[in-house]
Image (cartoon, helix red, strand yellow):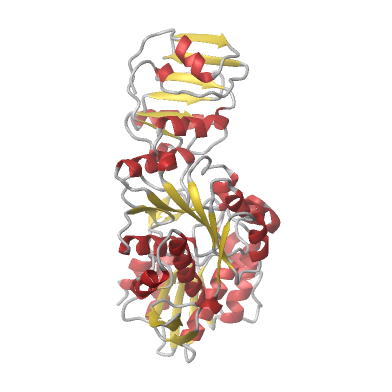
Amino acid sequence: MKGGALVIIHNDAKVSDSVVIHFGITNKKSYNTDMNISQLLTNITPTKIDIEVQGLCLNTQSAQIGDLFIALKGQSAHGIDYIDQAIDKGCVAVLVDSEDIECALPTIRIDYLSEHLQTLANTFYNNATQVNVIGITGTNGKTSVACFISQLLTKLGVKNGLIGTLGMTHSKQPCFNTTPDILTLYRVLHHYHQQDIHHVVLEVSSHALAQDRIAGLNIKQAVFTNLTQDHLDYHHTLDEYQATKQKLFALDCVESVILNEDDNCYEHFLKIAKGKKQISYSLSDFDAIKTIEQGFLVQLDHYVFEIPFLGAFNLLNVLAALSSVKALGFKRNDIIPLLHKLTPPSGRMQKIDSHLAWIDYAHTPDAIENAITTLQKHHPNFKIRLVFGCGGNRDKNKRAKMGKIASKLADTIILTNDNPRNEDPKTIINDILSGIDDSYELDIIEDRRLAIETAMTTLKENECLLIAGKGHETTQQFKDRTIDLNDIDIAKHVK
């Protein structure tokens, strides 16, 4: 879009109080107006400056040359303190909701800027809402279900995009959260549409729902995996966490919902989704299930086949994907023969070649219990060794619970760092230890690389090893630095 910096936004929302527009530090003019933004930008042109805006960004980490940087108050990499970084990244103008901002770029101030993000995104990336979105939410299993749905659609000849914890397919845009910010989402969906990708599978986190990151998207289907304790540092109570998750299923645009009947919260989600097409899935859908070393042998309808994943939770993930794709109009008999061809996402009960060792993203009490009991069921004659820690700046209440569950189920434990972030690693480990009986013998090796190498090199013939918490992640975050660290690579290269 060309013209002055004032013609890059069109919004019918009202602007409250005043709008201050500055073009550079020396050219500044204020306007008191009751016009809507669209009228304002059409009628006020204090200075003619030709600018070509290529995109919109909220986060300097994802800023690209030619972007308009939207600097919200009180945000981390989104805020006014990061304007200089946005300039370094090549942004050409700034939109702010703070007063007295001096900037070397054309700058527009609009009060309550955060309330206009959806309109900004929809105007600039106007094809984004033409893409059909499958939204998946739940405490655990989002990534696996999303990957399985995407794989099935691909095998059925449907070009699709996948956005979530592992990144974004068919896009060079970086992804720093399970669900990207609203501007990144709209940008990527807009570009998907330009690539003739009309179906996208999206992991929807509780943070995304609370912060309206998916506002206005064309979410046709909502999938619920399960609900257990997580993110109570943000949502405060489990009831609040559940209510946030349920927002996805109450959206007017959602036509069908896929619900886990085996979850304790099933009835609540069923009630919220009243009036929509409801499809439930359960382990009882299988006519027979036999646990084998490498996964399961199952019968579904008249088909008998292997599912090459460990854990009953993965059986549910496969059923969720089957139900989702069937709800899109595909025949069950065309989908079921593809299930044995599914491959697990990185870092989800991923076996290390030639070792009885697995990497898993489990970082909640429920997930770590499922991961340990899964290994016990598939390898009943083996003891379980566990390497894990807990992340800093996250729900502290789950640390003791994870310690208690781990010490109850695992035979030996090495406590280590996860992502300490801004917290003291020793404090996090002590929080975990508060849930472990003093009589339980364990090792503490804060250096995660050393902890994994020690566990691998000392693993006995009658032991299985579970390395939990970080899964696919390739970095480790400390207060003063971020280092390269990949559990999978470390485990694979131990001799």
Whether residue 15 is situated above or below residue 489 in the rendered picture: above
* Quadrant that contains the N terminus: top left
Q: Position of residue 350 (x, y in %)?
A: 39, 72
Could you tell whether 122 is left or right of 241 in the image?
A: left
- The residue positioned 59% from the left and 53% from the top of the image is 249
- Residue closer to the observer: 326 or 117: 326
Could you tell whether 400 is left or right of 281 in the image?
A: right
Can residue 34 be seen in the rendering of this structure? yes
Q: Position of residue 132 (x, y in %)?
A: 43, 48
- The residue positioned 30% from the left and 60% from the top of the image is 157
For the view shown, which residue lies furthest in the bottom direction?
A: 381
Could you tell whether 450 is left or right of 397 in the image?
A: left
- Residue closer to the observer: 441 or 382: 382
- The residue positioned 43% from the left and 17% from the top of the image is 6
- Residue closer to the observer: 481 or 155: 155
Whether residue 303 is situated above or below residue 276 in the rendered picture: below
Q: Residue 99, located in which quarter of the rendered image?
A: top right
* Quadrant that contains the C terminus: bottom left
Q: Position of residue 68 (x, y in %)?
A: 40, 28
Q: Position of residue 237 (x, y in %)?
A: 70, 55
- The residue positioned 50% from the left and 31% from the top of the image is 119
Q: How many marks?
A: 0
